[in-house]
Amino acid sequence: MCDPMIATGLALNAAGTAYSGQQQAKNAKRQVAARNDTAEAERIRQKAHQEAAAGVFNKSLGEYQGAEQAKGERQAVDRRMTAVDKAAAETKSVGLPTAGSAPQVVRAEAARKMAGASADARAEASRAAKLGGFGDLFFNNSQMLTGNRSKLGTIGDFSARSAGLLPYEQQVAAANATKAPGMFGDLLKLAGTAATIYGATGGNFGKIADMFSGGGHARTFAPDNASWSTMPHTGNIW
Amino acid sequence: MCLPSASVPKDNSAEIARQEEAARQARITEGEAKIGEAFGQFDDPFYASREKSYTDYYFPQLEEQYNDARRKLVLSLAGSGNLNSGSGAGEMADLTKAFETQRSTTAGSALDFGNTTRSNVEAARQELIAQNRAAADPSAAASSAMARAGVLTPLPAFSPLGDIFASLISSAAIPLAAESKGYPGFKTGLFSADSSAVRTVK
């Protein structure tokens, strides 16, 4: 039959161990929750970055839709044509200084050739404007992409730096969420150990001292026949 | 019995790092806004003025060359007796077409020049944005932006126009002069054979 003192000691020890384990489990839960909260906060930040980046990308993509490109090309060609028209309108070309005595047929031929030359030059300029307008469209696309790439670069920088902080934040959050374990569990275990030893030795402190010292000198202040109640309290036995 | 548990101070280092990152992002955003302000001067009127500077430089040269070429052509045609001829009118029409085409080309080149300026300005702006991101220092970004914007503002040196109509004049004058001397030339049939220039050898 087990000594009641030993049983009590073992029970106290088990209770202390269970209590400490429970405290550790609670700490682990708090750490996990803290890490999750930090990750969630970062997820929200990253989502905002992602949405901003998606907005820029969609804008770039939107510019490449057929209607937008057609509109851009039309505007570019119109701009070229306006410049050509302005240059043509300001042109001060003059024909041959034909003499008044020149035959009508010669004057008419000269006028026809001059008109033809101007028309040819204008037609050539129009074709060049269309060609140049197409080049302008590509140029404008490139400028737009460059500007948007820069915006994406800034967003990417913000995103990467923010994400880079997450592991450290999680580590610190977990550490901050950890509560220092109370001493209750340790005290229970200590009491259990003490009770177990007491029960195991029958309350003979001399034997207890023997257990830890290997016998001998402890007897000088803890005789074999000394009981717990009669033994002078001389200090910590451990 | 109540034993006090050991109290560990809260670790604020991550919070400080997060605040510092937020401050860095704010500085970058502020820096980009300042770059935008400094480059605000490069708007459509700015590029239009650059394009106008281009045509203001080249059009007078072109007109001067045209007038010069026209004068030479008229003299040449008059000298060869072709001033009041269809052939002379054709030569003048060619000159006119070359002149008008050249004006249109120059107007287009002005737009190309405007595009090149835009490209250079945008490249400088991108470089500053990258630098701002690296430095995350808006005051440095603003001063660099002002400096770069100042460098971009003056007009670059333009090369003067080459002799546009020279080949046209010589190509017109020589055949006509030759024809007036009895050689085939343009074969306009406007010149009667000059006995002093043509001799039939039997």
Image (cartoon, coloured by chain):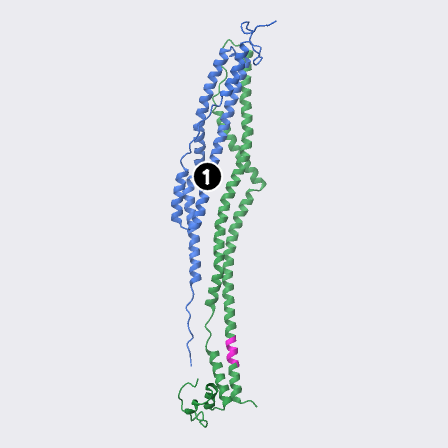
Quadrant showing the C terminus of chain A: bottom left
Vertical placement of residue A142 versus B75, above or below: below
User: Relative to the observer, which residue lies in front, B143 or A134?
Assistant: B143
Question: Of residues B55 and A70, which is closer to you in this image?
Answer: B55
- Residue B14 image point, x, y percent: 44, 61
Q: Is residue A75 visible?
A: no
Residue under mark 1: which chain is it in?
Answer: B
Judge whether A121 appears above or below A43 on screen: above
Chain A, chosen colour in render: green
Residue ID at (44%, 24%): B61
Residue lying furthest bottom in this view?
A225
Circle 1: element type: helix
Chain identifier, blue in the render: B
Q: Label 1 neighbourhood size at 10 Å, few (<14), some (14-19), many (20+)? A: few
Q: In this picture, is A166 found above or below A231? A: above
Quarter of the image for residue A230 reads bottom left
Question: What quarter of the picture does the N terminus of chain A occupy?
Answer: bottom right
Percent of width and height locating residue B106? 48, 28
Q: Position of residue A134 (x, y in %)?
A: 55, 35
Q: Main secondary structure of the magenta part?
A: helix
Q: Nearer the viewer, residue A32 or A168?
A: A168
Report if residue A78 is visible in the image: yes
Give the image location of residue B33, x and y in percent. Answer: 42, 47
Name the image quarter holding residue A138: top right
Residue pictured at 51% horizontal, 15% vertical: B173
Residue B170 is inside the magenta segment: no
Q: Which residue in the protein does label 1 denote? A: B120
Q: Residue at the spot x=52%, y=25% of the render? A: B101
Q: Which residues are magenta?
A: A14-21
Q: Decide whether residue A17 is among the magenta residues.
A: yes
Kind of residue indicated by mark 1: Asn
